[in-house]
């Protein structure tokens, strides 16, 4: 499993509109191959800072999979007017835990 963590810098005056727009396009994400779940988190200290954390079955499901799809293009197109700069995205591999530590 991998996690994609995307930093979404939203214009502070548009946070409520952004949340509504995200809810509208979320089905484009949730139907993607390899999608396992997501969390959209809003900053407490900075309410215009959102993090989208998506769990994918594999790196390939995320990129090129969803990233290269028409659904991704529409997803981003619907959100871009709320962002004041390009989102930054990172992917992380899930590591096994050692419960004996």
Image: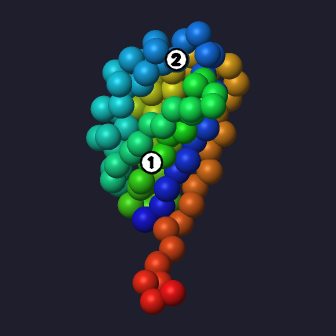
Query: Who's the residue at 30% across and 32% down the image?
Result: 27
Q: Residue furthest bottom?
A: 100
- Categorize mark 1 by other alpha carbons within 10 Å: few (<14), some (14-19), many (20+): many
Q: Disc 1 marks which residue?
A: 54
Whether pointer 2 and pointer 1 mark residues with C-beta atoms closer than 8 Å, the reply is no
Q: Nearer the viewer, residue 12 or 55?
A: 12
Color encoding of the figure = rainbow
Question: Can you tell which mark lies on residue 42?
Answer: none
Q: Residue furthest right?
A: 85
Q: Disc 2 marks which residue?
A: 15
Q: Residue furthest top?
A: 13
- Give how far apart the Cα atoms at labels 2 and 1 are: 20 Å
Q: Is residue 73 left or right of residue 8?
A: left
* Above or below, comparing residue 93 to residue 25 in the picture: below
> From where the camera sits, is residue 70 visible?
no
Q: Nearer the viewer, residue 42 or 94?
A: 42
Q: x%, y% of residue 51?
A: 54, 38
Query: Who's the residue at 39% across and 17% down the image?
Result: 20
Residue 22 location, quadrant: top left
Q: x%, y% of residue 83?
A: 61, 20
């Amino acid at each position: 499993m991998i996690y994609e963590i995307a930093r979404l810098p939203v214009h502070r005056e548009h946070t409520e509109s952004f949340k509504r727009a995200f809810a509208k396009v979320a089905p484009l994400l949730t139907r993607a191959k390899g999608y396992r779940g997501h969390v959209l988190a809003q900053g407490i200290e900075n309410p215009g800072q959102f993090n989208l954390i998506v769990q994918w079955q594999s790196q390939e499901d995320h990129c090129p999979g969803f990233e290269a799809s028409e659904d991704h293009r529409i997803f981003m197109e619907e959100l871009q007017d709320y962002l004041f700069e390009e989102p930054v995205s990172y992917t992380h591999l899930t590591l096994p835990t050692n419960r004996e530590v």
